Structure formats: structure tokens, C-alpha cells
Image (cartoon, rainbow, N blue to C red):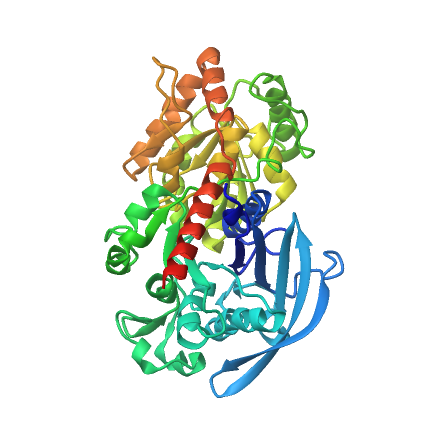
């Protein structure tokens, strides 16, 4: 890497990041990508909301003593800036208790907060105000998902003189979440009505925050090569495929990585026994320990299937429901960890109660248990209807837990169907999103499981893959440098 690239100053804008706040994979990506970039010599700063759930004392967060003032409609909203550090990355937090000191990040079990438009436009514009009061002028402002998608627009409309050299990059982590609000909220944004049109924020008569990033960021990325193609089609574009096709030259698909320090079966403090691709004996010990922990019979010869997921429609829970009875007739066991929509939680709980010897469902999220499930399971189910990238299939591969996936998005990019004759491949895939296609791959996996030699080959294929951020982070560095070069030529 050139000395010029090593001096890059990058600011991430995101609604969540480990270790501070997490609801899904976005938090993992922000933490691990920012740390990887720092390891490559870049300066990276992350801005987050200071949610009420974040323990300031435990994380040693310190007040900067600096205040921001953000225009919201016809008034001024104030916030305070706090700072902390993790894995070499500087984090700044925007405190505004009326917006962020709540039970949930985005809503409750009853639904999204009614004022999310106001909350996240305050956050987005608050980041720009925060950069001003802190005296920071980054080379690139890297914005993530709809919560920060207004930043590229505000930078061009109201802050260009403050940040004349700053370029913007917007990453789509999941196009299914767009930040769509009724048009009566327009007054909150303090933007001219000229932006409420098809090539702006207007979306079927409503306001679409995500479009701010899609239209006004200098560069777009998404989290896998396959997903970058899918979102330009009517089937995957979530009614924004036309916008994305207009910007296809600026859209790059970059597969996410995982934190290979946290997810390492050879040095995992949460699991019963260490193991790696050359020493697989520990995997069987982890399986027995998991069976005992969740209350399943200790049956070594029965494949143990697992899911760790949000229980929402696009994760394929309906597809799972349609095959559960068939699965329960097979010589298997199944453990599921997750939470989400209550009707899915109830459906899975009912099935587990009917088949206590075969199925266990844990509602909620337990990070330590997630590690033990990955280490103890034989197979991992990811029948997602769509999956921008996915992280758990990468963790599963690293832990020798074979994924069965729907061939979509990042699952298509990262899982290769196992071929018995050649011994190549790392999992099982089904292309047609149907119960029949899903159950056939489960049956195929059970058949192969009986062939211990081929199964060990399959496990090792997965475990020896590189799922770190190394190569993908390098692509981001090249994108950042290209954006800076373009800015200097303007």
C-alpha cells in the first residue's frame, strides 16, 4: 500500500456497532471492517447514537464537553458528544436523550418508533455538525444503511463549504429497510421541495431516506457481488431497481468478512474443546456438550442441525415451517436460537414442545450460546428468501458446521455445492425457493453425513477458507483512494 493510502482519514456513520449496540449483522460489520482498516494503516472514526442501553461507565465513555446544534423543522435540537475507543478505532457518540434514551434502538415489539424520521435525520445531520465542532475533515464519509443515508445529500446541499474535499460512500447492507415516512414529515428535513421528486427523496408519495444515499453519494457499495446484481432487478430491487440501474457504474459488490479472532474454533473460550481442520476430535466433544446443555439426547450418529437467526420473513422461516414436520420424521436433532416476530416464535415453540427429543428452541440471543451452537452443530440452515451477504454461514464454515443455503445474494457467493466425485465444495445449495428443493438438500446432506471420510473432507474444505476482512478491506481502501483522486481533480 502506498504511503498516500496509509494516510487516509475515514469516518463511518452507522446506527450500531459492536461492542456498543447490536441488533443484527450491521454491528458486526462496522466493528470488524473499521478495525481491519486501522490494521492497514488508515485512520478510522465511527459515529453512533448514544443509546440508553450503552453503559457509559463500562465502556469508559468520556464527554468531549462539546455540543452540537441541529436544525430540525423550525427549531434547534441540541446534543452532546462523547468519545470512546475500541480495537484502535475512535468512536464518537451523539447524546440526545429524547431521541435515543429508549427501550429499543428502532422500536418495540409493537413496531417502529413513530418519530424515527426525526430521530435519524437529527443523527445524520448531527454527525456533520459534530465533525465541525471537533475540527475533523475526513477524506471519505462512509455511510451505512438508511439511518445515515441523508448525509451525502446534506453534505452537498448545506455543508460543502465546510467539507470541500470530503467524498461520500454509501453502503447498502439490506435494501429491505429503506426508512420510508409519510410526506408530512418533510418539514423536519429543512430541505427545498426540489428534492421531493423521483430523482430525489420522493417514493410513491412518501419520503425515502435510503434514496438520499443512492442518488447523492459519490460511490455505492453493497455486501456481495450477487446482491449487487439482484437489487438491479424487479425481483430483488424492492422498487428501487431503476435507481440502482442508473447508478450501476458506481455500484460495487464487496463480500463481508468476519472477525476471525472472535470466531476461531482453535481458540474459542466459549466452547467445550478446541479444534481445527487438522484436529477435528474436539468437534465431537462440542456436539456432546451442546446436546447436554440444551437438553437433547446425546446421540453422536444423529446429525445436529442448527439455526441462529432473526425470526423474520426474509430469513426463510415460512419455508422452514413448511418442512418442519417432514424434518421431525428424519433421524436428526435441531436447535434454533433467535427472536423476532411473535407468530414465528410461537410456531417454533409449539413444534419443539411436540418433539422434545428432537428439537430445542431458545428465544432471544445469547452470544456465548451462539458460539457453542456453531461449534456443536453438524449442519447450519440458512433458507433465506434473500440474503445480502450473511455472516453466520461464514462462521459456520470456519467451525466445520456445514451450511445448507438458498442460492441468493452472499450465500451464492460464499457457499459452493459439494461434489462427491471431486471432493470440492463447502456446503449445500438449493436454487428454487421451495419446500421441495430445501428438503432435498437436507436429505442429501444426511446421506453424505453417513460417509465419514467425505464428511471430513467437506468440513475441512470449509474450515480452510479465508473469511477474514483482508481482501475485502483492501477493495475498500482502493475505492477510498479512487474517490479522493476524483475529488482532487474537481
Q: In which quarter of the image is residue 167?
A: bottom left
The answer to whether 101 appears left or right of 462 in the picture is right
Residue 269: image location, x then y, percent: 69, 33
Q: In which quarter of the image is residue 52?
A: bottom right
The residue lying furthest to the bottom in this view is 74
Q: Which residue is drawn at 35% across and 19% down?
A: 419
Q: Residue at x 60, y 51 (%)?
A: 18
* 437 vs 467, nearest the viewer: 467
Residue 73: image location, x then y, percent: 47, 84
Q: How many marks?
A: 0
The answer, for residue 32, to whether it is visible in the render is yes
* 371 vs 132, nearest the viewer: 132
The answer, for residue 50, to whether it is visible in the render is no
Residue 158: image location, x then y, percent: 44, 77
Q: Quadrant of the C terminus?
A: bottom left
* 472 vs 463, nearest the viewer: 472
The answer to whether 3 appears left or right of 151 in the picture is right
Residue 197: image location, x then y, percent: 27, 74
The answer to whether 459 appears left or right of 213 in the picture is right
Residue 325 sits above or below residue 93 on the image: above
Amino acid at each position: 500500500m502506498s504511503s498516500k493510502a496509509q494516510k487516509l482519514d475515514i469516518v463511518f456513520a452507522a446506527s450500531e456497532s459492536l461492542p456498543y449496540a447490536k441488533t443484527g449483522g450491521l454491528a458486526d460489520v462496522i466493528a470488524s471492517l473499521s478495525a481491519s482498516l486501522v490494521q492497514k494503516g488508515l485512520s478510522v472514526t465511527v459515529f453512533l447514537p448514544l443509546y440508553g442501553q450503552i453503559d457509559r461507565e463500562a465502556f469508559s465513555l468520556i464527554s468531549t464537553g462539546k455540543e452540537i446544534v441541529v436544525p430540525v423543522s423550525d427549531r434547534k435540537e441540541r446534543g452532546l458528544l462523547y468519545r470512546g475507543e475500541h480495537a484502535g478505532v475512535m468512536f464518537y457518540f451523539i447524546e440526545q436523550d429524547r431521541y435515543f434514551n429508549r427501550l429499543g434502538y428502532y422500536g418495540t415489539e409493537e413496531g417502529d418508533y413513530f418519530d424515527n424520521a426525526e430521530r435519524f435525520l437529527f443523527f445524520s445531520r448531527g454527525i456533520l455538525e459534530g465533525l465541525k465542532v471537533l475540527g475533523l475533515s475526513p477524506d471519505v464519509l462512509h455511510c451505512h444503511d438508511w439511518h445515515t443515508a441523508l448525509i451525502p445529500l446534506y453534505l452537498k446541499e448545506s455543508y460543502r463549504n465546510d467539507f470541500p474535499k470530503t467524498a461520500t460512500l454509501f453502503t447498502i447492507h439490506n435494501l429491505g429497510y429503506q426508512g420510508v415516512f409519510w410526506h408530512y414529515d418533510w418539514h423536519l428535513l429543512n430541505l427545498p421541495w426540489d428534492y421531493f421528486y423521483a430523482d430525489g427523496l420522493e417514493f410513491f408519495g412518501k419520503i425515502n431516506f435510503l434514496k438520499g444515499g443512492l442518488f447523492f453519494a459519490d460511490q455505492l457499495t453493497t455486501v456481495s457481488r450477487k446482491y449487487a446484481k439482484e437489487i438491479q432487478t424487479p425481483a430483488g430491487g424492492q422498487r428501487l431497481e431503476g435507481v440502482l440501474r442508473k447508478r450501476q457504474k458506481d455500484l460495487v459488490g464487496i463480500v463481508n468478512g468476519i472477525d476471525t479472532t472472535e470466531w476461531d474454533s482453535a481458540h474459542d473460550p466459549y466452547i467445550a474443546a478446541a479444534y481445527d481442520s487438522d484436529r477435528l476430535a474436539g468437534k465431537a466433544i462440542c456436539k456432546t456438550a451442546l446436546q447436554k446443555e440444551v437438553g437433547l439426547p446425546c446421540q453422536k450418529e444423529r446429525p445436529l442441525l442448527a439455526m441462529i437467526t432473526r425470526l423474520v420473513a426474509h430469513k426463510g422461516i415460512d419455508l422452514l415451517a413448511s418442512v418442519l414436520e417432514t424434518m421431525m420424521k428424519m433421524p436428526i436433532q435441531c436447535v434454533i436460537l433467535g427472536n423476532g416476530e411473535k407468530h414465528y416464535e410461537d410456531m417454533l415453540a409449539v413444534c419443539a414442545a411436540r418433539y422434545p427429543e428432537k428439537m430445542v428452541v431458545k428465544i432471544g440471543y445469547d452470544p456465548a450460546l451462539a458460539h457453542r451452537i456453531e461449534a456443536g452443530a453438524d449442519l447450519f440452515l440458512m433458507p433465506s428468501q434473500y440474503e445480502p451477504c450473511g455472516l453466520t454461514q461464514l462462521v459456520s464454515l470456519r467451525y466445520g458446521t456445514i451450511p445448507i443455503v438458498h442460492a441468493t445474494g452472499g450465500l451464492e457467493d460464499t457457499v459452493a455445492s459439494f461434489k462427491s466425485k471431486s471432493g470440492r465444495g463447502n456446503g449445500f445449495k438449493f436454487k428454487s425457493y421451495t419446500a421441495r428443493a430445501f428438503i432435498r438438500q437436507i436429505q442429501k446432506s444426511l446421506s453424505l453425513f453417513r460417509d465419514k471420510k467425505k464428511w471430513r473432507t467437506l468440513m475441512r474444505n470449509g474450515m480452510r477458507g479465508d473469511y477474514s476482512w483482508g481482501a475485502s478491506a483492501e477493495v475498500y481502501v482502493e475505492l477510498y483512494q479512487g474517490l479522493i483522486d476524483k475529488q482532487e481533480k474537481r
